[in-house]
Amino acid sequence: MAGRRLDAEGRAGLALISPPLLFALLILAAPLLTILATSFLTDGYLEIIRELTLANYAQVFTDPIVRVVMLRSLGVAAMVTLVTVVLAFPVAYYVSFHVRPERKAMWLFLITIPFWTSYLIRVFLWKVILGFNGVVNTTLTGLGIIDAPLTFILYNVNSIVITLAHAYAPFAILPIFIALEKIDRSLLEAGRDLGESRLMTFWRVTLPLAMPGVIAAVLIVFIPTIGDYVTPEVIGGGKIPMIANLIQVQMLALDNRPLGSALAVTTMLIVALVSILFLALNRRFLRGR
């Protein structure tokens, strides 16, 4: 009788998840498989020749331009992730440990306000802020700190990092906040009762217990950042292309879809390897808890 009930529940669960599963396969798996298949084809003049080849991947791994752009993308993504998580942790810590419980919802509401506007609008606003006649230059000039507008605060890697760090800050704050909220406060009190300072209690108790949230924030920020297209194009002025910009050029401007697909697949594999590494770290911290 119990076995029949379990079988019935299993069929009901399968029927329940089948529609979203089929939808996910259609929307996600089909395009990914198409890109994967295209990456092994040969590019012809305004057409794709259906001849299997590894030349596209050979070019991806041997072309010095691709190597430079890929390393730049990884470096920018790592820098954005580091800046975002380092700045997000104090905010999440303050909201979790120092804000009264009845006001935490309001703080989280304020943190999510940037989501009210389009990502593209926020990128253009940063261009206005950092521009030649933007807010920063106008303020510094008006205060007499500088005589002429600064030209190095826009169209460079630093401006890209600032813009992306601001754009993805809420994505880092929220998972860290959730991890901090799950920490049993009695553990912190026990550490202080044993003579540990607040700093050592944070280092030995709070930070290790919050690491799953930190790792989640790293993944949430790193994965979309490495494939960002808009910010390098607008804030970088097209002078500092990242891998997404190179894929766009191959796919549309040069009409070399096999090479563009090979670049996309290689990028996804690199992101997958980084994600697996951080997931393994997350599992280690969870075991330690």
Image (spheres, grey):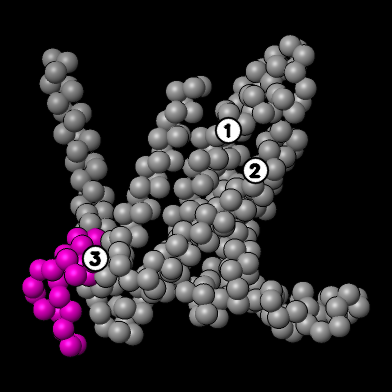
The reply to whether callout 2 and callout 3 are in contact (CB within 8 Å) is no
Q: Residue furthest left?
A: 51
* Tag 2 residue: 89
Q: CA distance from mark 1 to mark 2?
A: 10 Å
Which stretch is magenta? 30-58
Nearer the N terminus, badge 2 or badge 3? Answer: 3
From the viewer's perspective, is 43 left or right of 215? left
- SS assignment at label 2: helix
- The location of residue 62, given as percent across then percent down, is 30, 67
* Residue positioned 60% across, 26% down in the render: 183
Q: Is residue 48 visible?
A: yes
Is 120 magenta? The answer is: no
Image check: 22 left or right of 267?
A: left
**Mark 3 is on which residue type?**
Tyr
Please tell me whether residue 203 is drawn above or below residue 253 in the rendered image.
Answer: above
Name the residue type under label 1.
Answer: Ala
**Cα separation between marks 2 and 3:** 39 Å
- Where is the N terminus found, in terms of image quarters? top left
Kind of residue sitting beneath label 2: Phe
Q: Nearer the viewer, mark 2 or mark 3?
A: 3
Q: Position of residue 209 (x, y in %)?
A: 57, 28
